[in-house]
Image (spheres, grey):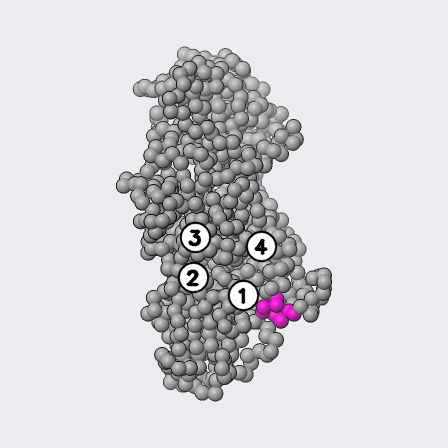
Amino acid sequence: MGIHNQLCFLASLALVIHAGPILQHADEDEATAERYLKSFYNLTDETISVRKETSSMTEKMKEMQEFFGLKVTGKMDQETMEMMKKPRCGVPDVAAYSTFGGIKWQTNKLTYRILNYTPDMSRAEVDESMERALQVWAKVTPLKFTRIHSGTADIMISFGTRNHGDAYPFDGPRGTLAHAFAPSPGIGGDAHFDDDESFTFRSSRGFVLFLVAAHEFGHSLGLSHSNVRGALMFPTYSFTDPDRFSLPSDDIRGIQSLYGPNRDRTPVKPDEEVTTPNACDPDLVLDAVTTLRGETVFFKDSFFWRKSQSRTVTQIPIKHFWSNAPDNIDAAYENQVQDKVFFFKDRQVWAFKGITPEPGYPKTLSSFGLPSSVRKVSAAVHDKTTGKTLFFVDKVYYSYDERAQKMDTGYPKQVENGFPGLTGEVTAAHISNGNIYLYSGTNVYEFRLYTSPEDYQIAEAYLSQFYRDPNATKFRSRMSPLDLKNELKAMQEFFGLEVTAYLSQFYRDPNATKFRSRMSPLDLKNELKAMQEFFGLEVTLSMGEVDATIAKAFKLYSDVIPLDFKQIHSGTADIMILFKARYHGDFYPFDGPNGVLAHANAPGPEQGGDTHFDDDEWWTLSSQGINLLLVAAHEFGHALGLDHSRDPSALMYPTYGYVSTNGYTLPRVRTNKPDPNPGPSPPEPCNRDLVFDAATSIRGELYFFKNGYYWKKGYYSGLSLHEIKSTWPSIDSVDAAYEFSDRDVSFLFKGQQYWAVRRGTTLPGYPKPITNFGFPSYVRKIDAAVHVKSVGRTLFFVGTEYWSFNEKTAQMVRGFPKNIQRYFPGIGSRVDAAFENYGYLYFSKGSRQIEYNFNLGRVNRVLLNYAWLDCYKHLNENEKK
């Protein structure tokens, strides 16, 4: 463990943390940037030369970056493009004619009129939203607003799409939300809202009309845009709970500079200027530290410092980057897999993807499984290697499994026990280069996370001398990992230590953290392999790899029969699994390498179902040695009651033969009798012309349907092929499918019927007619369906049109169907299959597939369907061969 003084730690700590690559098309981004700068920064065709790299576009880019508080480079970096793609107001940040400065109404009594309404909300909700938005400004000024229902008002309010009569056409969904005109005769003061957007009353699933209107009315009263992130007049939209909204101080200063304060109310004073913290203050105590896309971010009060290898330390107000985030945060961490950063303050947590707030936040600490007694998290840190996040609360810490989305058992634990020498409260934390840095007051503690191979040498010498198992399989010059585990347990039991059988509990480098009670599979894999390579042993499987392979072998059976398998870590299980060599206690000794590989007992009491593997074999996950998955799956067949098969292609054939385990499923046993009702032939996955019937996600796994079969693809389970009827017996083929994860239910469509399923179970009462969704009777089938969680709508594609279904109200949205090509430009006129994955929508037509950014309304890239079925990898392997 190393202890550092925190003085100027920000400037001295060098970090190498790599974010995942992001695919972008340079030409599309350049076109986006040009359109943006033309619309909002007065870039004209006359200022652009044939080659776009010239100074005029660069200068406008710098102007835009400076306005938003970004790093001023003049280049289209990731932060700049993210800002350009955010939904925003249509009023320029730099206007060609003038700024709004000084322009105001010459009277304090103004009228407004609502000309028409959006179908997204009731008339009463629109009326209330507009009235409240105007009152935002009336509360802090002498302005009075009166609604009229006929004639010409000072502020005429209307909803329209595309070309709507003012020479400033809207651009469709997720772009320009609205625009308004500065005070003047005629069109001055008028506010127009893009009816292609989804406006809401309060919900974050769309754009809150009150927030958009309050911003636009700021323009109607004479305010231009503000470059203070968090101000109402900041150009881009950001959700805030409308019931808790209060006008920020920057906006109050601006509007009162035009009209003065409201003397009928208690004056609302703008916030005092915030004192800027000093990074090199020797008494500096940081609020939080986290990584963010390759940089390290240090928080203090309402500011943060950002540091990376490529830039000096810069200090920025928090709200200039995350307008919805609170100041004075308690903790922060980044989940690199999800590309999200989480901020904690008091009992709440906020989530952002880059600088964009995630819908549904803030949430309470209980959403992570923390007990209600926890009032705040003092520090948090995520280890992407293990998938675990540590939450520090006072002098204890919790471990959260991001993959399982639940707290690990056995927590909380004392910080001092897990990190010896650290006796105070942990106030901030982050990980870099295999070290974890824990901040306590003005000190920083450095701990190593992993064990060195030399530690194994010391452990082996000790255990060999004093704890050699008298019943060990045989004498070896070097101990196997299994021997080491058994003898380590004996040593731990003797000394009254926690019996974990993990080496890191016995001995760790003095600069490492104190031993964790449980190691992740990847930690154990790395340490075991390091030991084996150090001692010249064959590199065998780690505990984690064995556990995962055993689980996968059981899953081959649970996928096709109604059995559930659960691993337990103590007591007697139905199937006890053992790795041992030669005599191992069951009167059926093994015979050494390359003989009997394993055996299992049929179902029954006591030893029934137990499965033993010969530890003299070289177990692997490949074609070298003996593939553990194939042998385990065979033996578990016996444990479940199967005898040997005479079919050489069957898994239960007596002799071992390697077959590829990529996407492996149980073989369909052949018989000499022809099947009177043969099912459809399994589809070929790696056919470049593959056309999907349907696609969806179910509980984090992707399902691709084709000709009575479906491929299932998961992060941990890999790729496998299944017959649809083997999972859902009443369904033989699927036209369309989508998942509604809020209810943990998926819907499968065929013809004019649909089924609701929950994983492998069809819910009672189905099938039902698709007219239940509100489809007219002339719709004969659904081509594709996908649920867009961010807006709470499900899109149904039928021919060249699509419907929008509101899951909350269980009704079709008014104004549909609409033309696919018009509202989803670039995806084609028809859709065969659609699904969502990691925030993108995927639309298939024929063998081609479009990756589509729904929030930005743009195509990212074009794929082939078979890319999802690991075919690129196989093609590369074949090329190497």
In the image, residue 369 sits, relative to residue 272, either above or below, namely above
Whole-number angstrom distance, CA of label 2 to CA of label 1:
26 Å
Label 1: few (<14), some (14–19) or many (≥20) C-alpha neighbours in 10 Å:
many
Q: Amino acid at mark 1?
A: His
Label 2: few (<14), some (14–19) or many (≥20) C-alpha neighbours in 10 Å:
some
Choose top left, top right, bottom left or bottom right for residue 71: bottom right
Asked which secondary structure carries label 3, the reply is strand
User: Residue 320: which numbered mark, if any?
Assistant: 1
Q: Residue at x 42, y 49 (%)?
A: 798
Indicate which label's residue lies in the foreground, 2 or 3. 3
Instruction: From the image, tell me which residue sits under label 3.
Output: 802
Q: Residue at x 52, y 57 (%)?
A: 856
Instruction: From the image, tell me which residue sits under label 2.
Output: 198
Q: Magenta stretch?
A: 37-44
Q: Amino acid at mark 2?
A: Ser
Residues at discs 3 and 4 in contact (Cβ within 8 Å): no
Left or right: residue 772 versus residue 848 is left
Residues at discs 2 and 3 in contact (Cβ within 8 Å): no
Asked which secondary structure carries label 4, the reply is strand
Instruction: From the image, tell me which residue sits under label 4.
Output: 296
In the image, residue 318 sits, relative to residue 518, either above or below, namely below
Q: Position of residue 83 (x, y in %)?
A: 56, 61
Q: Earlier in the sequence, mark 2 or mark 1?
A: 2
Whole-number angstrom distance, CA of label 1 to CA of label 4:
17 Å
Please indicate, yes or no, whether residue 13 appears anywhere in the rendered image: no
Is 39 colored magenta in this rendering? Answer: yes
Towards the viewer: 765 or 424: 765
Residues at discs 2 and 1 in contact (Cβ within 8 Å): no
In the image, residue 739 sits, relative to residue 468, either above or below, namely below
Q: Earlier in the sequence, mark 3 or mark 4?
A: 4
Whole-number angstrom distance, CA of label 3 to CA of label 1:
39 Å
